[in-house]
Image: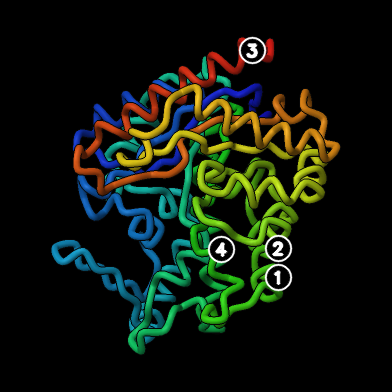
């Protein structure tokens, strides 16, 4: 099992499409395809809702697009959930929660360099889901340990299914909430988060990584026991390049970086060109090279992707599709320039 590099392409999973087949076609246009998450198609396809399937205590209102938690309901449902704890199918994403996932599983993807799945991670899930007192469930010491194990099981079941399609399958754990860990308002500090994430990753099969579009503490993130980190370098180029020692350590232990360089927001996309984005990307690499990171090794352990997901463009899915096309073009030009196979 190996995560590819050499500036091949992938993307984040959340897409604005309402047409399942069209979204899947675009995901398959990249070197490392994935199954899209389509919240505009159905609220069941929201990344938090998908992670919450079968989680005890969840109150899901699809019509009003709300997702809540009740501790009383959690206690009442916990025994039933535990009765299914050794049933892999129980922890998989059902067809109700993702039609496109099951279409993806029906494809022959054995010839791809790798394929990828994803699930919301515990920090973000726990921050986002509020209980009956408007308190994030991440802060509940009686719920959080169960949540870590529950989400780990869901990730492992999905990864096992994907490995059946391609031995180089890997997972993104989506963690946008990591950027809030170090704010005064978080109420859940980095020491506790590090301990919980160490427990969480100890329960997850390899290879595994984190995807986020925000700006966390990069020393913290790159120091976790991961094989791959996916980020929005378009927005965070300057600050990320300042973490050369942490980046070097991550690469030296075999880590792969996914550089999200093509913006998907319509305004940002329209002011850029493929040449401006190549210049921006190479400036980051050159900065790291000057700080002692071997460029050949760095590129061999790099993938390229659009910078973020975007659900709110006035042109709906058009700019996102253009970003997918541009990342493929950008990849081809950079691979040719750097003589990568």
Q: Are marks 1 and 2 in contact (CB under 8 Å)?
A: yes
Rounded to the nearest whole Å, what is the CA distance between mark 3 and mark 2?
Answer: 39 Å
Q: Residues within 10 Å of mark 2 (few under 14, many from 20)?
A: few
Which picture quadrant has residue 335? top right
Image position, residue 106 (x, y; %): 36, 26
Which mark is first along the chain, 1 or 4?
4
Residue occupied by mark 1:
195
- Circle 3 sits in a helix, a strand or a loop, which is it? helix
Which residue is at 41% across, 83% downward? 75
Instruction: Report whether 302 appears left or right of 330.
Output: right
Nearest-to-viewer mark from 3 and 4: 3
Nearest-to-viewer mark from 4 and 1: 4
Rounded to the nearest whole Å, what is the CA distance between mark 4 and mark 1?
Answer: 14 Å
Which mark is first along the chain, 2 or 4?
4
Image vertical order of residue 51 relative to residue 35, above or below: below
Which residue is at 75% across, 38% downward? 288
Which picture quadrant has residue 281? top right
What mark, if any, has residue 178 been given in the picture? 4
Rounded to the nearest whole Å, what is the CA distance between mark 4 and mark 2?
Answer: 14 Å
Residue occupied by mark 3:
337
- Circle 2 sits in a helix, a strand or a loop, which is it? helix
């Amino acid at each position: 099992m190996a995560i590819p590099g050499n500036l091949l392409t992938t993307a984040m999973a959340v897409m604005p499409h309402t047409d399942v087949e069209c979204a899947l076609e675009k995901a398959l246009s990249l070197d490392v395809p994935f199954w899209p998450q389509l919240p505009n198609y159905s609220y069941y396809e929201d990344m938090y809702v998908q992670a919450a399937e079968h989680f005890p205590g969840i109150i899901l209102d699809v019509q009003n697009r709300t997702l809540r938690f009740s501790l009383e309901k959690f206690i009442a449902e916990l025994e039933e959930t535990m009765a299914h704890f050794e049933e892999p199918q129980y922890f998989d994403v059902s067809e109700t929660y993702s039609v496109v996932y099951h279409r993806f599983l029906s494809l022959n993807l054995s010839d791809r360099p790798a394929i990828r799945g994803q699930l919301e991670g515990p920090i973000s899930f726990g921050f986002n889901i509020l209980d009956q007192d408007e308190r994030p469930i991440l802060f509940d010491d009686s719920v959080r340990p169960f949540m870590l194990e529950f989400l780990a099981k869901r990730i492992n079941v999905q990864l096992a299914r994907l490995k059946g399609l391609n031995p180089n399958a890997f997972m993104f754990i989506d963690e946008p909430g990591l950027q809030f860990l170090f704010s005064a308002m978080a109420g859940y500090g980095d020491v506790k988060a590090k301990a919980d994430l160490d427990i969480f990753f100890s329960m997850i099969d390899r290879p595994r990584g984190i995807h986020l579009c925000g700006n966390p503490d990069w020393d913290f993130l790159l120091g976790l026991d991961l094989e791959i980190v996916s980020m929005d370098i378009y927005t965070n180029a300057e600050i990320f390049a300042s973490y050369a020692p942490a980046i070097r350590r991550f690469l030296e232990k075999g880590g792969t970086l996914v550089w999200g360089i093509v913006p998907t927001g319509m305004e940002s996309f329209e002011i850029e060109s493929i040449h401006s984005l190549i210049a921006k990307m190479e400036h980051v690499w050159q900065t790291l090279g000057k700080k002692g990171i071997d460029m050949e090794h760095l590129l061999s352990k790099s993938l390229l992707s659009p910078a973020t997901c975007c659900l709110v463009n006035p042109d709906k899915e058009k700019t996102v599709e253009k970003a997918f096309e541009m990342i493929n073009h950008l990849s081809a030009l950079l691979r040719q320039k750097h003589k990568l196979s």
